[in-house]
């Protein structure tokens, strides 16, 4: 498919907080609950992100010596330079995280995943680790995939991982804060064309819990190899499949995919001084005196089984060569064909 440059008409009409209909214009929900949050928590986040996922390390180790690897959404740069025989260039939307990478001697630049600063056919391979789930519309997620494919050479490989709705620890979904339907439509756009049931929806308070630590402890992975994929049926629009929010019993609707996931920034962290006052005032964070932390909300769109490959279904210049489930993440490897 050609890389989309415009949001669909229906989505554009409901993106009330964007200044442009262009898919490269960042929705406010991402600015507030992704960009500003990671800028605020960067040093603490970096201190907790040091373990390398075996699957990512294996992918990088399989590349030819001398390969140029583009890490889009490199975070604190834990994968940059992992394989000494390859060259790495990283980018991330968070300037504080990029500064951490630069201090480590890595070649990095501040950039958006939907508008990579690389010429076409530049790299030999690319990785996007835990990035796409922070993009709030399907059009932006598709654009990010297109950018990854565009930036690598013919025959180049692209590894993409996203948080899965099908969490190994199923209790996590009940602890995250589901975004209410009204909130999602105001910030992101319609969830689907399905007729929705007239239930009373509201944004729930974030439970007092530790942040998800996906990817920091190895677990068994379920591999689904091969370029021919089983077709996964789309969610039904029949009555009963409507989006439902967390009920009094704690059950979450089957179609719920938009969440706030908390990050606890301890009071004793150096970056806390001064920063939380503004965050607390504008609703970006809240205090949790019991845990001695400032709690930030992070926006996530979790992917259901088959959703990531459906996102690639219209690609005309790349094919899926591998897909697997690893540590509560859906993962795909693409190869550029044109």
Image (tube, rainbow, N blue to C red):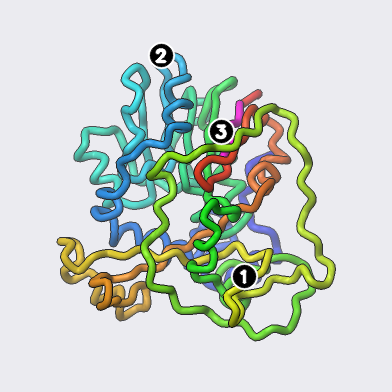
Disc 3: CA contacts within 10 A as few (<14), some (14-19) or many (>=20): many
Q: Is residue 103 above or below residue 233?
A: above
Q: Earlier in the sequence, mark 2 or mark 1?
A: 2
Q: Which mark is residue 252?
A: 1
Q: What distance separates the C-alpha of mark 2 from that of mark 1?
A: 47 Å
Q: Secondary structure at mark 1?
A: loop
SS at circle 3: helix
Report if residue 122 is visible in the image. Answer: no
The residue segment tinted magenta is 331-335
Q: CA separation, marks 2 and 3? A: 22 Å
Could you say where residue 197 lies in the image, as x and y percent from the top left? Answer: 75, 79
| Outermost residue toward the top in this view | 65
Q: Residue tagged by mark 3?
A: 150
State the residue in front, 151 or 59.
59
Which numbered disc, 2 or 3, marks the residue that appears first in the sequence?
A: 2
User: What is the count of numbered marks?
Assistant: 3
Residue 337 is at least partly visible in this image: yes
Q: Which residue is located at x 46 percent, y 19 percent? A: 63
Q: Tag 2, which secondary structure?
A: loop
Q: Nearer the viewer, mark 3 or mark 1?
A: 1
Mark 2 and mark 3 in contact? Answer it, CB < 8 Å: no
Cβ atoms under marks 2 and 1 closer than 8 Å: no
- For mark 2, what is the residue? 65
Determine the residue positioned at 55% across, 53% down. Answer: 167
Numbered circle sitting on residue 97: none
């Amino acid at each position: 498919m050609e890389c989309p440059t415009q949001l669909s008409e229906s989505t554009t009409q409901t993106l009330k907080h964007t200044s442009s209909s262009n898919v490269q214009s960042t929705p406010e929900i991402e600015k507030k609950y992704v960009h500003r949050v990671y800028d605020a928590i960067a040093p603490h986040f970096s201190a907790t992100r040091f373990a390398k996922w075996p699957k990512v390390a294996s992918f990088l180790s399989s590349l030819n010596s001398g390969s140029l690897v583009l890490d889009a959404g490199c975070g604190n740069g834990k994968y940059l330079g992992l394989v000494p025989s390859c060259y790495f260039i990283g980018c991330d939307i968070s300037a504080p995280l990029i500064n951490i990478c630069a201090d480590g001697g890595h070649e990095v630049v501040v950039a958006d995943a939907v508008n990579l600063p690389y010429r076409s056919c530049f790299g030999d391979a690319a990785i996007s680790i835990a990035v796409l789930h922070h993009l709030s519309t399907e059009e932006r997620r598709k654009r990010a995939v297109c950018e990854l494919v565009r930036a690598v050479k013919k025959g180049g490989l692209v590894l993409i991982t996203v948080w899965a709705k099908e969490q190994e620890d199923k209790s996590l979904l009940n602890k995250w804060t589901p975004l209410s339907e009204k909130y999602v439509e105001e910030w992101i756009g319609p969830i689907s064309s399905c007729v929705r049931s007239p239930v009373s929806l509201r944004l729930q308070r974030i439970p007092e819990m530790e942040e998800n630590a996906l990817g920091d402890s190895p677990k068994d992975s379920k591999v689904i190899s091969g370029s021919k994929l089983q077709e996964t049926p789309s969610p039904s629009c029949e009555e009963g499949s409507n989006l439902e929010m967390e009920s009094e019993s704690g059950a979450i609707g089957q179609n719920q995919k938009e969440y706030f996931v908390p990050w606890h920034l301890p009071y004793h962290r150096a970056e806390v001084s001064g920063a939380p006052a503004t965050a607390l005032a504008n609703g970006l964070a809240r205090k949790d005196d019991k845990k001695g932390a400032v709690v930030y909300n992070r926006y996530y769109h979790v992917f259901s089984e088959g959703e990531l490959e459906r996102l690639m279904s219209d690609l005309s210049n790349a094919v899926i060569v591998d897909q697997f489930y690893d540590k509560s993440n859906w993962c795909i490897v693409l190869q550029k064909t044109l």
